[in-house]
Amino acid sequence: MGEQKGMTIQGNMATALGAKLCKPNVIPAYPITPSTLFPEKLSEYIADGELDAEMIRVESEHSAMSACIGASSTGARTCTASASQGIALMHEMLFIAAGMRLPIVMAVGNRALSAPINIWADHQDSIASRDSGWMQFYAEKNQEGLDLMILAFRIAEDERVLLPAMVGIDGFVLTHTVEGVQVPAQEDVDDFLPPYDPPHGKLDPEEPMTFGSLGTPDFYQELKYDQTEALEKAPEVIDEVFDEFEEEFGREYNRITPYKCDDADIILLTMGSMSGTARAAVDEMREEGKKVGMAKMTVFRPFPGDLLKEIAGDADGLAVVDRNISPGFGGAVFAECAGTFINESKSPLMKNFIIGLGGREIFKENFKEMYEKTKEAVEAGEVEKPVEWLNMNEDVMR
Amino acid sequence: MTKVKITIGGINKKAGSSKEYKTGSWRTMKPEVDIEKCIQCFKCFDYCPDGAVKKTEDAIIIDLDYCKGCGICKRECPVKAIEMIEEEK
């Protein structure tokens, strides 16, 4: 077991370093704020002879994902990075990557979608591709960004899964923020992540096969079922790989990580960088004697409903914090939480808080407000307003 | 329901498998050629949108595995050597 090296780096550098340790063979990428540093760093590693990989400079994100699909089909370990409009532009290719069962890994610098144009932190970009069939991981800090890249490759390439994965780090809050990280030794990552050898077939002129062919009504539905089942069974592999990672590298990962939830009446459910702020708010509220906990969701797809039930099933109230909005309903995470409890005899009352869109800061006070509002609903025994927007500028001229 | 065989990601381990996919089954009308009338002008060959007309030494053959029965060959034939008849299934 080699020693881990301490480094102080930006989030994009952390995901790039995580990717480099996985020794990708092909990196088709089209830079976009706030994940630009990812392809820049990887091309630097290649130029410096530190990484033996093919960098494909493409003309758009649609082409980037198309090239990823081609490369991964040959059995190459493939990664890319994108954000916001870039992910929107590659939308159709995302479905194809998942449908063809290609374990591509994409680092996402989570950013708001236009209009109005905005380059700051927001989960809308990856949330909008929720139904593409990709696994989705969200990091709280740079260390998680680095580790999740390695974990994502290992899980995606598992023969029981064979699906692509996104690793989201919040734009600027993480992508451009310098933090200390522990970098695993190359030989340990080599042991943890064996070379990729696609068990389902690969493009090879010596042994031609048909990829991406027509799926007629006779069997389209069966193929979609098979793909969906692979994603739904992935939690077993994810848990197993998370455990092994902790054993090897000493850092714990869970699909949802509870904090002070055991005796909590109210639980805050968070995703991404906001989780640290929520944890600090929980600590302060606990000092005031409030029975509150928080749970950080690291894996959004496949949705960890089983763990959510375990963690929040006995709570009185669940405050779901969404840094995204599905106009006409509410936050995406909220919708899934509600769906998780739909047939349970006991369910916490649920409130949804939309916050932090387009890089709007999220403060400890906001989490305290969420606690109070959820507590009020619990005491009243009803949720008058299920979806609320917090931290709004009150004095808006129209 | 029919029995189908699927693979992970729909990968077909055989190359050129589209050749085995016979699209002529959609047809409701099929062309019948009167070889006696055919003058080998090959207009039907030129106009067939599906490449289903094959040239031979002295006439033409319609590949019914792929012919969709659109009737363009009948319309273009200058000597009316092609008739469209109802497909029997």
Image (cartoon, helix red, strand yellow):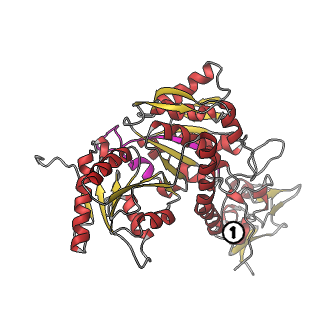
Decide which of B17, A352 is in the foreground and name it: A352
In the displayed structure image, the side of residue B8 where residue A370 appears, left or right = left
A188 falls in the magenta region: no
* Mark 1: secondary structure: loop
What residue appears at the point 75 percent right and 60 percent down from the top-left corner?
B52
The image quadrant of residue B82 is: bottom right
The image quadrant of residue A148 is: top right
What residue appears at the point 53 percent right and 37 percent down from the top-left corner?
A146
Q: Which residue reaches farthest top? A: A48
The residue tagged 1 is: B69
Q: Tell me which chain the residue with mark 1 is part of.
A: B
Residue A221 is situated, as x and y percent measured from the top left of the image, at 62, 68
Position of the N terminus of chain A, as image quadrant, is top right
A104 falls in the magenta region: yes
Residue extent of the magenta highlight? A102-127
Give the crowd class for mark 1: few <14, some 14-19, many >=20 residues within 10 Å: many
